Image (cartoon, helix red, strand yellow):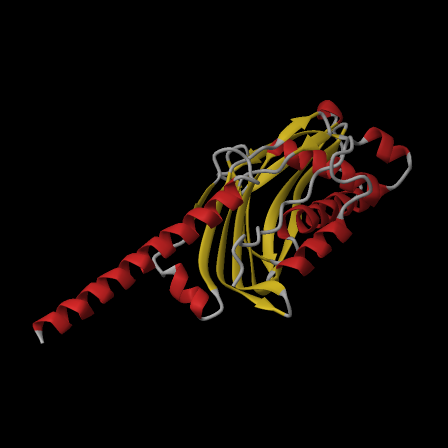
Amino acid sequence: MKTAWKVVLSIIVAVLLLFIVAEAGIRAFVAHQVTSQSPEGTSVSFGASPVTIGLLGGKFPHMTVDQQSDLKVNGDQITGNPASVVDMDNVRLNGGEPVAESVRLTTELPNDFVRAMLNQQIQDQIGDNFLANVITVSDVVSNEEAGTFSIVFTSGAAGIELQPVMQDGQLTFQARSTELFGFALPDDVADAISSAMSQGVAQEATGGMSVEDFTVIPGGLRVTVSGNDVNFKELQEMQQSQQLPGQPGQPGQAPQQPAPQQPAYQP
């Protein structure tokens, strides 16, 4: 009888060891696959829930990707992407396509990135006319204490102060003050700039997900977006369809904020 119990215990120990080895192996494999395709310094964590048990149920339980920035801004030319933290829960295959039960992404957009993004959007909003040639964004200045940021045009000849406002779950921007050569900007110009900012954030940061938070921080803006039942393939296709002509990699075009990475090990 004692021998039987010893055998049972040895089997249990062996199974637990295999479970631990499998758990560690899967985590190491997925982490390597993600970090090898991301900027240097990117890290991956999986939370407390065992990955192996989740996979037995057909789901990848949790993954957090802390992606470092490889963003470079040279004038209006932008390459790479800003830093972001992505949390994904219960990723499963649905019709062969990976779908996450929930995704939450936080990214910080430096002022230089916002400036270049706005120059592209303003051209689309104002069109090819006199103002389009005169009004170019030369600087973006954050005022985190007031919760606003100032957009400076044509080396200080004009400026507008915007405040992000959440209304009915939608992000909008309200103009607090405007000025052109010492005079107030026309309302249609202020509206075009506010609209350009809204559309720019929608294209470059949200990826079709809902804005949870938009905060003015020192040196830039912090955006948090989230979504439920996020289909990664559809999300990537949506971002590609929203790209401005020539994005990414062509002069003057801001790159898309990357969609949350698909787990390399799919259930």
In this view, the residue farthest toward the right is: 129
The residue that appears at 39% across and 66% down in the rendered structure is 53
- Work out whether residue 51 or residue 48 is closer to the camera in this orientation and state it: 51
**Residue at figure coordinates x 63%, y 45% from the top left:** 257
Judge by depth and name the residue closer to the eye, 6 or 135: 6
Q: Residue 159 at x, y = what percent? A: 70, 33
- Quadrant of the image occupied by residue 141: top right
Residue 168 is at least partly visible in this image: no
Q: Give the residue at the far bottom of this rendering.
A: 1
Q: Is residue 44 above or below residue 151?
A: below
Measured as percent of width and height from the top left, residue 160 is found at: 69, 37
- Left or right: residue 58 compared with residue 185: left
Q: In this view, does 112 lie to the left or right of 2?
A: right
What is the quadrant of the N terminus in the image?
A: bottom left
Q: At 42% across and 47% down in the image, what residue appears?
A: 28
User: Quick check: 199 above or below 52?
Assistant: above
Q: Nearer the viewer, residue 194 or 69?
A: 69
Number of numbered tags placed on the structure image = 0
- Residue 29, image x and y in percent? 46, 48
**Residue 28 visible within the image:** yes
- Residue 161, image x and y in percent? 64, 39
Taking 49 as reference, is 59 left or right?
Answer: right
Q: Residue at x 40, y 60 (%)?
A: 51
Q: Please identify the quarter of the rendering in which residue 43 is found.
A: top left
